Image (cartoon, grey):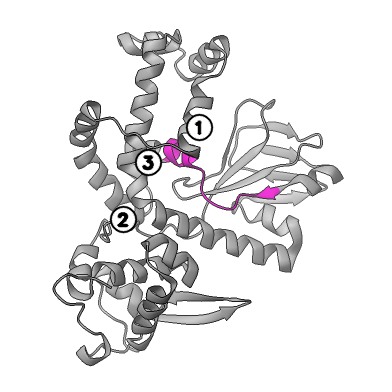
Amino acid sequence: MLRIHFTAEDFARTTLAPGPDPMWEILHSLHMLQVEDGPIAYGAWRQRMRRRLPRETVGAVTAPATGVGEFDDAVDRLLAVPRERFRTDLAQLTPRRSSVGWVRQLSEARPESLHRLRHAIRVYHQSALVPYWPSLKAAVQADQRHRLDQLTSGGIAAVLEGVHPQARWRDQVLEIAAFQDSDLRLNGRGLRLQPSYFCWRQPTKLADQELPPVLVFPIRNATGLVHSDGATCANQEQLAALVGRTRATVLALTVNGTTTTQLAEACGITLATASHQTAVLREAGLIESHRRGKSVVHLATRLGRALLEGSPAGPGDTVMHESRLPHPGPDHGP
């Protein structure tokens, strides 16, 4: 059991991450590729990645990704740690000496092996996460809104207990049974709560207790991811052919609940276009829209989810008619 000890100062410094963290999603998604179990939502993404990654990786070697920004900075920070610490941390992961040459070089923190690792991380990020990032981000932010509702109704203790079914709050200590027996004393540093799409089954944390404390936990509803071209890993391509890629993507993003502004940002469209798309989907009975403060939150109905999943509509669901859902035209546009 993990016991996280809080002080009054830790409460004041405990924060909830505003969105997904790329490096944690890389770590957990790589683990998901190596196992066979997990929710159905992961299965389709996993199958697609296993088919595509080898070919895409070879292509990326000849034409490396050149993206810049926060992700590249995070990779650079990761590989800029002192070599001795790099060796120590890697030794904990690979206690037996590997016979693979580049793994041995990596454990020795050789420049050429670090360069290879940096390139591999960037290629994987571009292939496995970037095309799905708007959908993944929407799912994580939907979970964040749920945590904020918990904070409003039950306080920080309710948020902390909500990170896992086996989490309990007792006497200023958060106990999580899904860990080996250990204690983490925050000592006034606070705790960063990081929801994660690919984190599954139980939370995780940094092994080094000297680093800023972070607790990564699974989101409540990890639905199927939507590819940036408008196709989900399941039957989104057929839906896109029926109603248009933009409209299909908008519908998929509303599964977890999302605002008009978030839809516009995720789809790369204007607010006016996003409002038009949601109006069409609402008229067709595929989404519901509710005002929350200054924003309007859109949520897929049971009929909308059934259409996305390719499953039969329920007994009480309304059947769409052609007049209620305009054909998008030959370009499958908005």
Q: Residue 67 appears in which quarter of the rendering?
A: top left
Residue 112 location (% of width, % of height): 36, 12
Identify the residue at image location x=63%, y=56%: 162
In terms of secondary structure, where does tag 3 sit? helix
Dot 2 corresponds to which residue? 228
Residue located 24% across and 37% down the image: 53
Q: Earlier in the sequence, mark 2 or mark 3?
A: 3
For the record, the magenta segment spans 15-28
Q: Quadrant of the N terminus?
A: top right
Q: State which quadrant residue 97 falls in.
A: top left
**How far from the left and from the top, in percent, is residue 270?**
40, 69
**Mark 1 and mark 2 residues within 8 Å of each other at the beta carbon:** no
Q: Which residue is mark 3?
A: 32
Amino acid carrying label 2: it is: Ser
Q: CA distance from mark 1 to mark 3?
A: 25 Å
Q: Name the N-terminal-most of marks 1 and 2.
A: 1
Residue 330: give x, y in percent of width and height.
Answer: 13, 73
Mark 1 — residue? 73
- At label 3, counting other C-alpha atoms closer than 10 Å, the crowd grade (few under 14, some 14-19, many 20 or more) is some
**Residue flagged by tag 1: what amino acid is it?**
Asp
**Callout 2 touching callout 3 (CB < 8 Å):** no
